[in-house]
Each structure stands twice: as structure tokens, then as C-alpha cells.
Amino acid sequence: MNKYYLAYGMNTSKASMEHRCPEARSLGKVVLPDHSLAFRGVCDIVKTPGTDMECALWTITDACEHSLDQLEGYPNFYSKKEVEVMYNGHIIQAMIYYMVNTEQLGFPGSYYLQMVADGYYDHNIDLEQISQALKEVQKLDESYLCI
């Protein structure tokens, strides 16, 4: 049985998803209300009232979900929940991963960041989300220099 999956990090990349979940199908870009992107070495979502976040919407099979669970370190590194998004004029339920440990922001590696940017290009997602998340890490980094 297929289900909807929202990606906002490296799983926005069509090439990456084709490799790890060949049965997954991209449905394009959707907006996740009241959330924003954060970097904790890798991508995470943060509940942010009043801010909309663009994500890639996929249909996935149970086998895809199992593969993604392994990749994301579910349930210890990432957990998952159902969220509502608008797709083709209808509200749907989609699964999304979020990090379990949210104590520290951190810069992503360059290879990972390029994979995320490639996925954003694949789905016409605004790269400003990446820029904003990097600025938040930079602010934290600069505050440590002031101590």
C-alpha cells in the first residue's frame, strides 16, 4: 500500500531516492505550514508558527518506508509523525521524519549540503530555506566566539 512521504533534506534528491527507494514517485513540491528547516549536522524540521516550509512530496511503498527507516536511524536518530499538507486542492496526511535530539544546531558537510541543494533544484524548492537555516547555525557559531 502506498503512502505519502514529505522530504526536506537529502531525500528531496530524485537520484538519491531512485537509488534507495526505486518504487517511490515524486509528486512535486508542497508547503508544510508552521515549520522551518534547521541544520543539526543534517536537516531537521522545527515547529515555527507563521512560517511555511517547502518540501518534496513522494508516494512510497512499505518497502520504501522500511529502507528510509534504516537510513534515518528510526526510531533513535529520527522519529516520524503524520502531518497535513495541501496537495492538488485536497488536504492529505503525509509521513515526515524529525530528529529526536534537538539540542544542538550544526553545519552540514559540503557533500550532504550539495545533495540537499540538488534535491531542491529537482523539486523547484526555494534555496532560501537552506540559506536561512545556515544563517541560524552561523548566529549560534558567532555567539560562541563572544564567550
Image: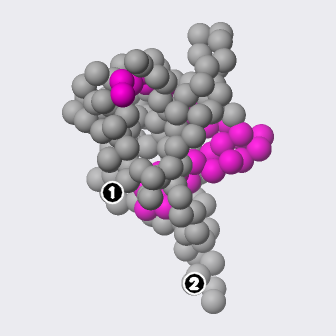
The image shows residue 43 at horizontal and vertical percentages of: 47, 51
Three-letter amino acid code at disc 1?
Ser
Where disc 1 sits, the SS reads helix
Dominant SS type (magenta)? strand
Q: In the rendered view, does 20 fall on the left or right side of 84?
A: left
Report how many numbered discs are placed on residues in the image.
2
Q: Quadrant of residue 141?
A: bottom right
In what quadrant of the picture does the N terminus appear?
top left
Is residue 118 something one can see in this rendering?
Answer: no
The image shows residue 105 at horizontal and vertical percentages of: 54, 65
Closest to the observer, 6 or 69: 69
Residue at the disc numbered 2: 145
Q: Quadrant of residue 137?
A: bottom right
The image shows residue 28 at horizontal and vertical percentages of: 47, 20
Q: Earlier in the sequence, mark 2 or mark 1?
A: 1
Q: In the rendered view, does 112 fall on the left or right side of 18?
A: right
Q: Is residue 59 above or below residue 46?
A: above
Three-letter amino acid code at disc 2?
Leu
Is residue 3 something one can see in this rendering?
Answer: yes
In what quadrant of the picture does the C terminus appear?
bottom right
Residue at image x 46%, y 36%? 7
Residue at image x 32%, y 31%? 64
Residue farthest to the bottom?
A: 147
Q: Residues within 10 Å of mark 2 (few under 14, many from 20)?
A: few
Residue at the disc numbered 1: 110
Residue at image x 35%, y 60%? 109
Closest to the observer, 92 or 43: 92
Residue interval drawn in magenta:
34-62
Residue 47 painted magenta: yes
Colouring method of the image: one colour
Q: Is residue 147 above or below residue 110?
A: below
Residue farthest to the left?
A: 19
